[in-house]
Image (cartoon, rainbow, N blue to C red):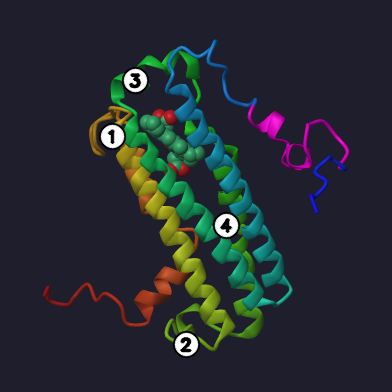
Amino acid sequence: MKRDKSPVLPGAGATDYARYMRTDVLLGLQRHPDEVIHRDELLFQVVHQSSELWLKLAAAEVAEATARVDAGELAAAEALLARSTLAVRLVTDQLEMFRHLSPADFQAMQPALGNGSGAESPGWRKVQTASRKLGRSFADQLANRGIAAAALDPADPTDPACRLAEAMIEWDERVAHWRFRHYQVALRIGGHAPAGTPGSPATMLARLVEHRFFPELWQARLDAGGDDPGAAPL
Ligand code: HEM
């Protein structure tokens, strides 16, 4: 029997898919071919707009993971944080699309971008705020349980606190991966001079690669027998 595909959902759109996914609105959010000053504006907008969507999901999952930490449900928090981590990996992969954007073409579309900068990304801001809250909540949980961060054993898969700490380390690492790839994009496409060159914004981008949301978890690895500054090099 043929399935009835006539829409039953309320709202605008010819199909229920269009109504639920709001495709008419979504696909109208890119500049029309008549108004672009360079055809690669579509590529540029698609990468940025889809990044904003994945970052929206990432921040929401970090926020929910934090709520689970506050409730003492560390295993649930770990599973939610894994979603955020995957979202940031996908955002990192999307930067590959800029291999198809030349510095000259990027330069040509600059007037369309005004004074806009990815540094104003609402998605990244939310990710940062949510991640800082997660760090505070986890520290509170450890304190409530009388566990020192240095006592967390990364090799213990049975302890939910250890597993969540590992997931947080990975989250930090994946964000740093994005930052490193983004730094390279700024050099390659943005035509910025490398880090250390006076006045280059790439200096700030390179410095941010070292940023960690959960420095105490990284420190705990050192305290647990990591790098000994006094040790002889291999
Ligand atoms: C052709 C592609 C891109 C170039 C050339 C580029 C370049 C830059 C530059 C030079 C900065 C330093 C601040 C400034 O001068 O405005 C910056 C910052 C930033 N950009 Fe991009 N960007 C690109 C794509 C993206 C994408 C796709 C995103 C994703 C939303 C993004 C997000 C950010 C963020 C969050 C910052 C603040 C620094 C940080 O938190 O690490 N950028 N970008």
Residue at 42% across, 85% down: 155
The residue type indicated by label 3 comes to Asp
Contact (Cβ within 8 Å) of mark 4 with mark 2: no
Residue 103 at x, y percent in the picture: 30, 24
Residue at 63% across, 70% down: 77
Label placed on residue 131? 4
Residue 14 at x, y percent in the picture: 78, 32
Q: Distance between the residues labelled 3 and 1?
A: 15 Å
Q: In front: mark 4 or mark 1? A: 1
Label placed on residue 14? none
Q: In front: mark 4 or mark 3? A: 3
Give the residues drawn in magenta, as a range: 9-27
Q: In front: mark 3 or mark 2? A: 3
Q: Distance between the residues labelled 2 and 1?
A: 41 Å
User: Splitting the image into 4 quarters, where does residue 38 fall?
Assistant: top left
Residue at 58% across, 25% down: 30
